[in-house]
Image (spheres, rainbow, N blue to C red):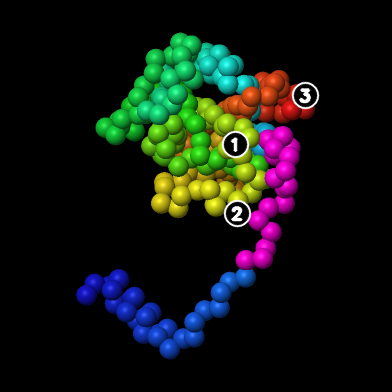
Amino acid sequence: MNSRDRVLARVRAAVADAPEAPEPARDYLTGHTPDDDPGALVDLLHANLADYRALVHRTDTEGLPALLARLLAERGAATVLAPPGLPPSWLSTAGAVQVRDRAASTPAELDAVDSVVTGCALAIAETGTLVLDGSPDQGRRRITLVPDHHICVVRVPDQVVASVPRAMGRLAPTRPLTWISGPSATSDIELDRVEGVHGPRTLEVVLVGDRPPGVSGPAGTPRPPC
């Protein structure tokens, strides 16, 4: 018997005569934003993403390849990492050389990649959070943690939920979930913010819907209502 087994045995012995725990009450609110206005949810997501210093853009399905090509060109990206399940049309007009997600890729190889483009599993409007679950259009977790520039595509409104509790009901707990709220950042005791410490220094989010797009631009750029 190892140390772990001994500790667990002691815990079991200590609670052997304990009464059954009561069923927890679950009558709390699961969100603060109504779900009956998808446009308002997307606007809230946009605002909170921008508040976290993500660069937010809007387009429709037809305009997505051209927008991605422009964002990569503006970044000066010569290489872009593409997960295996990324729709081929997304990068069909991009001038950057596509690098595939490989299990054998080393951290140094990933660090040499200029940009990565992925989809997402869900986006949470109230917290401005993107959730990746390792699906084919998102790839391995490390490809979004090592390169310095991440473009994440969110299909709106289908992939947008109001709150974290509502997201949990749509996410598989057995998947490798990565929760992203803005670019990687930390601050020291003097509150000096440093970005790119343990993930991308620049996060760009593209909200793709079939409605007419608003003005694409950096976070905080005025745009007409959706």
In primary-sequence order, the first of circles 1 and 3 is: 1
Q: Quadrant of the N terminus?
A: bottom left
Image coords of residue 20 (percent x, y): 49, 82
Is the C-beta separation of discs 2 and 3 under 8 Å? no
Tell me the element at label 3.
loop
Distance between mark 2 and mark 3 Cα atoms: 30 Å
Q: Which mark is residue 165?
A: 2
Distance between mark 1 and mark 3 Cα atoms: 21 Å
Q: Which residues are magenta?
A: 26-44
* Residue underneath mark 3: 224
Is the residue 46 above or below the residue 10 in the image?
above
Image coords of residue 204 (percent x, y): 57, 28
Is the residue 29 above or below the residue 147 in the image?
below
Q: Amino acid at mark 1?
A: Asp
Q: Inspect this view and state whether residue 218 appears.
A: no
Q: Quadrant of the C terminus?
A: top right
Looking at the image, which residue is at 46% across and 14% down? Answer: 92
Q: Quadrant of residue 87?
A: top left
Q: Quadrant of residue 215?
A: top right
Q: Amino acid at mark 2?
A: Pro
Estimate how packed mark 2 is, as few (under 14), some (14 to 19) or many (20 or more) residues with alpha carbons within 10 Å: few
Image coords of residue 127 (percent x, y): 64, 45
Estimate how packed mark 3 is, as few (under 14), some (14 to 19) or many (20 or more) residues with alpha carbons within 10 Å: few
